[in-house]
Structure formats: structure tokens, C-alpha cells
Amino acid sequence: MTEDSLKRLVLDANILVRAIFGVRVGILLEKYAGEVEFYTPDHCVSEARENIPGIARIRGIAPTEAESLLDRLVQNFLQVTDRSLYDAFEQQARERISDRDVDDWPVVATALLLRAPIWTEDKDYLGCGVATWTTGKVEIYLRSN
């Protein structure tokens, strides 16, 4: 695959958190890093960063260690999309997700911008007009041609 033909996938904040505190997401990111471009809006990185301390304490992990894992994910696997790029899709994204959690609009806007599906465990994205993949099924998308 050439750089221009790489598949794209938008990760929401819950997938970032799973990459930090779980196993499967990290394995998939590493396995498909050369074949798929993984994106996340800047909003999701901030949201994950806000949730790290509480989750880390519950799991008995040092919050600084978990924050370092997020930094490594961003550096090695993710392309963080700045709001200035997806902002033009805000109104459309808000309309598409208004019946659910309107705070998730940056993920929908980024998916619309990139014409890419969303990797999530959040059912709030269902019916927004963008394909969604859960961790249990995302490898079907990742390995497809």
C-alpha cells in the first residue's frame, strides 16, 4: 500500500483509555501501524488525559506512568487532529449526534473530515451516519483490502 492509499480510522477517547489500561487495543495499533492511519481529535486526547488519574488509582498504577503511555501512543501511533481542521464539520457533527452525547461531536467531525470510520465502544455513535467498529470486530476492517 502506498502512503496515499492507507486506510484511516478515528479513535475516540474510550479507545485511547483502553490502549493505556488494556492489552488488545495496543496490540492492534502496533500490528496495523504501517497499514492504517490512526487519528483522534485533540479533544479525545484531552479527555483521556483527564480520566487517567482516576482510572490509574483504581488500577493501582501511577498516574504519571499512564500519562507517559498516552504520550507514547500519540507519538508512535496516532495522528492528533487539531480542532482547526475539523471545526468546519461541527454543526453537521452536532446534528448527527444530537440525540446521544453531543459532547462527542469532535469524533464525528473528524470522521467526516477524513471520510473514515470510528473505532469506539460507545453506542452513542450508532446512527450518526458514520461506520463504527468495536474492538472485538475492528480487525475485520483493519485487515481488509
Image (cartoon, rainbow, N blue to C red):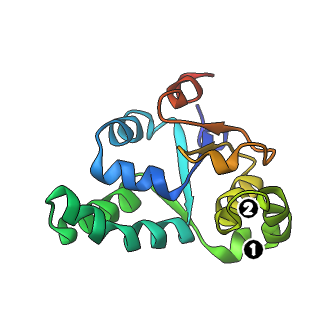
Question: Who's the residue at 38% across and 55% down the image?
Answer: 17
Q: Is residue 117 left or right of residue 121?
A: right
Quarter assignment of residue 85: bottom right
Q: Position of residue 139 (x, y in %)?
A: 50, 27
Extreme residue toward the bottom, this view: 84
Q: Which residue is mark 2?
A: 109
Question: Where in the figure is residue 87, as x and y percent of width and height?
Answer: 75, 74
The mark found on residue 134 in the picture is none
Q: Residue at x 23, y 63 (%)?
A: 56
Residue type for callout 2: Ala
How many callouts does the rendering have? 2
* Residue drawn at x 33%, y 66% as measured from the top left: 71
Q: In the rendered structure, find residue 87 and report the number of the disc placed on it.
A: 1
Could you tell me which quadrant the N terminus lies in? top right
**Residues under numbered marks 2 and 1 in contact, where contact means CB atoms less than 8 Å apart:** yes
Q: Is residue 100 above or below residue 132?
A: below
* Relative horizontal placement of residue 139, taking residue 97 as reference (left or right): left
Q: Is residue 41 left or right of residue 85?
A: left
Sort mark 1 into few (<14), some (14-19) or many (20+) by Cα contacts within 10 Å: some
Label 2 residue SS: helix
Tell me if 130 is positioned left or right of 51 in this view: right
Type of amino acid at the residue the image marks with label 1: Asp
Q: Nearer the viewer, residue 12 or 144?
A: 12
